[in-house]
Amino acid sequence: MGVTIKDIAKEAKVSIATVSRVINNKEDGVGKDTRENILKIMEKHNYVPSSLARGMVTKKTHIIGLILPDINNPFFPGIVRGAEDAASKYGYNIILCNTDDKEEKEIEHIQILKEKSVDGVIYTSTLEDKGENIDLFKKYKIPFVSMDRNRPLDEVPFISTDGEMGMYKVVEYLIQNGHTQIAYISGKKGMYAEYKRLRGYKKALSKYNIPIAPELIKYGDYKISGGIKCMEELLEENLKFTAVASENDLMAIGALEVLNNRGIKVPDEISVTGFDNIFLTKVTFPKITTVAQPTYEMGYNAVELLLKIINKEELLCQEIILNTNLIIRNSVAKL
Ligand code: RIB
């Protein structure tokens, strides 16, 4: 076992707290000679202080947790990149927790992060907006920021994009191309993101006096398999539609797969749109028209907001809503 803070304190004949003050560059309470002696001993032993040793005085580990539902979805790595960059700028490290969209894993991760004494957590929940896991953060007194999918209560700090406006823009684009029978593939029911984007879809239809047909709205799970399932349902029910707007890109890819496999031409027979602008939408056939979400900025801003909360510079209910962009490619036909 390597040298510990205890060994350094013993050799320097001081308390562990004194060594910790030196490690954390705290000026007060440690004389110049004592400080120099401690630094010399640390150097002699090539001692690198652990986050626990650092935290003895600051009560901070400089570690934050990042809980994500599905790291296989190319939407999420952009968030991780942004979060990583912001964390390293402020001297923090990230523990990445993937929940596979499972409630039990989410709870397990929150408990593990508590045990690791993280300074805070950025949390993209996989659950319906009931707020149970938010209660866990409150119970454990862990500062947190809710990101992207869920906003269980108004008074929690939240970062996301304007999903309602994003979906409005892409559905309006379909309407401007002559589509009036537009099916909709939604994400998981009960999510704040799902609610907002569905609202954007309905708003665009209403603006152009197009009646909302509930049978054209199907619920998936943000995965390719969900898009496949929804498109199969739409086709098997013999519903009439000339376009389908999907709540995320993976489900749009699933829908496209079904259409391609059945020889239904996209976009000539059915137009398809996505949401997220993941890199895969540029390599599908045809390339998918979608709505870009600034994932890097989401991750970066989430860390900055969390650090402000940790350092008590920010109100707990701060909300950051970023803009989206319509990305026009080849999957929408003009009727
Ligand atoms: O693809 C993942 C989806 O889940 C994204 O649209 C994101 O915003 C989240 O809701």
Image (spheres, rainbow, N blue to C red):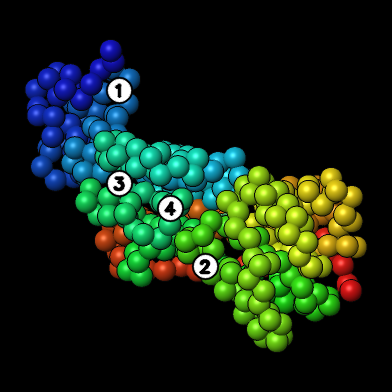
Q: Which residue is mark 4?
A: 127
Mark 2 or 1, which is nearer the eye? Answer: 2
Q: Amino acid at mark 3?
A: Asp
Residue 166, position in %: x, y?
63, 70
Quick check: 237 left or right of 220?
Answer: right
Mark 2–mark 3 contact, CB under 8 Å? Answer: no
Tell me if residue 243 comes above or below residue 102 in the rendering.
below
Q: Residue at x 75, y 55 (%)?
A: 236
Q: Amino acid at mark 1?
A: Tyr
Mark 1 or 3, which is nearer the eye? Answer: 3
Q: Nearer the viewer, residue 169 or 292?
A: 169
Tell me if residue 115 comes above or below residue 252 in the rendering.
above
Q: Amino acid at mark 4?
A: Leu
User: Which badge, 3 or 4, is on the more N-terminal residue?
Assistant: 3
CA separation, marks 2 and 1?
A: 52 Å
Q: Is residue 81 visible?
A: no
User: Which badge, 4 or 1, is on the more N-terminal residue?
Assistant: 1
Mark 4–mark 1 contact, CB under 8 Å? Answer: no
Q: Nearer the viewer, residue 206 or 330?
A: 206
Q: Quadrant of residue 326?
A: bottom right
CA separation, marks 4 and 1?
A: 44 Å
CA separation, marks 3 and 4?
A: 23 Å
Q: Residue at x 34, y 42 (%)?
A: 107
Quick check: 32 left or right of 186?
Answer: left
Residue 241, position in %: x, y?
78, 68
Disc 1 is placed on an element classified as loop
Mark 1–mark 3 contact, CB under 8 Å? Answer: no
CA separation, marks 2 and 3?
A: 31 Å
Label 2 CA crowd tier, 10 Å (few <14, some 14–19, many 20+): some
Residue at the front extreme?
237
Q: Which residue is mark 1?
A: 47
User: Which badge, 2 or 3, is on the more N-terminal residue?
Assistant: 3
